[in-house]
Image (cartoon, rainbow, N blue to C red):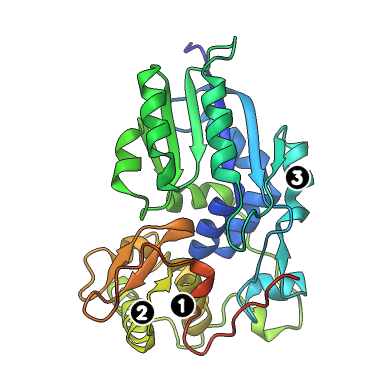
Amino acid sequence: MTEPRRAALYLDFDNVFAGLAAIDEWAAWNFASHPTRWLAWLAESAPGGPRRLLVRRCYLNPAGWTEPEPNGELAGWLGQPRLYYSRFRADFVRAGFTVVDCPRLARLKNAADIVMALDIHEALGHPTRFEEMLILSGDSDFTPLLHRLREHDRRIMVIAPDSAAAALRAAADQVIPLGDFAEITIPAETEPPVPSGDPNSDPSSDPTGDPVEPAAQRAAILATLRRLVAAAEVPLHLPALGKRIHLELGGWVRRSRFGGAGTLARLIEGAEDLVLESGPGGGWLYDPRRHALPSLQQPDLVPLPDAPRAPEEP
């Protein structure tokens, strides 16, 4: 029998939750409310296992929040317009995590990435020689840290969006796409809870009708993306686009997993006239003929056409 590998896990909660929500809001909800499910998969079934997760750290902005899709399944089930990250703190504590609060240091930026980097670097000198580091974040700023871990002969697993920088992916020994990880978070035998008597939260409702055939589904999604990008004066943040696509086209987008593409980022790959630029929380979609390179854009400053801007915190 293979001896379990000694491993340490570091999770950038805000980053991963936003990435999962862009794929499937219920994947994000299950990831945050049932961490023991995917922890067991990482320990026993994920590539490179089995492993003992001796360190489990979750870096979370206690004042952070997101807005579920208006009139969507999750919003209807919650009965409120905002979902605060702090509600999941106890779930991670019960799952054996040390939760490190990382409030914002600036209007849009918290300290999770630098605190994570310091903790990971410090772990290199720990008396328990951790053989593997599991990093759940798509932030390309971690790339130099991954190089340092490799110099110290540590294996590296990264769970990151498809849009994560190539340099970050190349520095890891194992990369789990966020779309594949999303499937782990949702048990196949269950359906999302739906409040009774609310037609807007019916998971079978499809505002535009399901094209059924995967090729037609992909074409419908891409046509909507091109329309939104054409109407936008600036690049559009991918997580917000994922929510907008689900809202406009209906529940079949989630059920079909973007017409069989798996993730929105994969669907966009190779699409004519559309470019996906990696960045915080999932990246930006833009038309290179009309938009400037969006790398320095702040995601919260890029509202979708006709979409209300989220109110600022006091």
Q: Amino acid at mark 2?
A: Leu
Q: Can residue 188 be seen in this snapshot?
A: no
What whole-number distance in Å separates the C-alpha atoms at marks 3 and 2?
A: 36 Å
Q: Earlier in the sequence, mark 2 or mark 1?
A: 2
> Is residue 76 positioned above or below 161 on the image?
below
- How packed is label 1: few (under 14 Cα within 10 Å), some, or many (20 or more)? many
| Tag 3 secondary structure | helix
Instruction: Tell me residue 208's x, y (percent).
Output: 45, 88
Q: Residue at x 49, y 27 (%)?
A: 133
* Residue 48 tag number: none
| Tag 2 secondary structure | helix
* Residue 245 tag number: 1
Q: Are marks 3 and 2 in contact (CB under 8 Å)?
A: no
Tell me where residue 126 sits by quadrant.
top right
Quickly name the residue at label 2: 225
Q: Amino acid at mark 1?
A: Ile
